[in-house]
Image: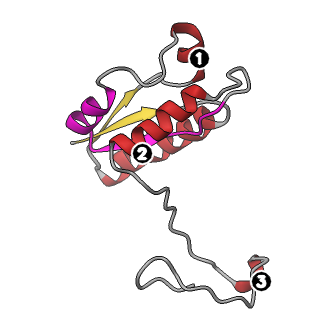
């Protein structure tokens, strides 16, 4: 069984993460995936309520107990400094050695981009620009 830490985040994050979990649960039912979801309330609400961003021991717990982390968007205008978002996102990226935010994409057709007719080397070995 794969354990997934679910951190919805702020703003549109909870809405997007809820739908992503829904898709994963559908795959669970139709493809027999064995997944266990564990929700965490880390985000602006917790920060505003308790003053906690990334709880002590959180990174060690995520590393030891989970196979994946599904995290939503972070940032809330009620937290002008965005301290919670910075602590959570950068805390996880640095602490879990997730030093880049690579989102592999594939261009379906040149007409779908303002960069049409421009060639750039792909940062992913074997991927087409």
Q: Nearer the viewer, residue 17 or 73?
A: 73
Q: Which residues are magenta?
A: 58-75
CA–CA distance in space, label 1 to label 2: 21 Å
Q: Which of label 3 and label 2 is nearer to you?
A: 2
Estimate how packed mark 1 is, as few (under 14), some (14 to 19) or many (20 or more) residues with alpha carbons within 10 Å: some
| Pointer 1 or 2: first along the chain | 1
Q: Nearer the viewer, residue 41 or 83?
A: 83
Vertical position of residue 9 compared to residue 44: above or below: below
- Residue at the spot x=58%, y=27% of the render? 83
Q: Which of label 1 and label 2 is nearer to you?
A: 2
**Residue 71 in magenta?**
yes
**Residue 69 in magenta?**
yes
Q: Nearer the viewer, residue 86 or 46?
A: 86
Vertical position of residue 114 compared to residue 56: above or below: below
Task: Give how far across and how far down residue 105 sits, in percent.
Answer: 55, 70
Q: Are marks 1 and 3 in contact (CB under 8 Å)?
A: no
The residue indicated by pointer 2 is 93
CA–CA distance in space, label 1 to label 3: 42 Å
The residue indicated by pointer 3 is 111
SS class, disc 1: helix
| Pointer 3 or 2: first along the chain | 2
Q: Could you say which disc has been placed on residue 45 in the image?
A: 1
């Amino acid at each position: 069984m794969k354990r997934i830490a679910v951190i919805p985040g702020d703003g549109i994050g909870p809405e997007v993460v809820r739908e992503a979990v829904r898709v994963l649960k559908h795959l669970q039912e139709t493809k027999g995936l064995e997944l266990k979801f564990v929700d965490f309330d880390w985000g602006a609400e917790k920060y505003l309520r308790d003053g906690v961003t990334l709880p002590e021991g959180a990174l060690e717990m995520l590393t030891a107990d989970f196979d994946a982390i599904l995290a939503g968007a972070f940032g809330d205008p009620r937290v002008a400094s965005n301290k919670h978002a910075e602590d959570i996102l950068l805390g996880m990226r640095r602490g879990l050695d997730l030093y880049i935010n690579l989102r592999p994409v594939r261009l379906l057709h040149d007409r779908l981009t303002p960069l049409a007719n421009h060639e750039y080397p792909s940062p992913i070995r074997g991927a087409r620009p």
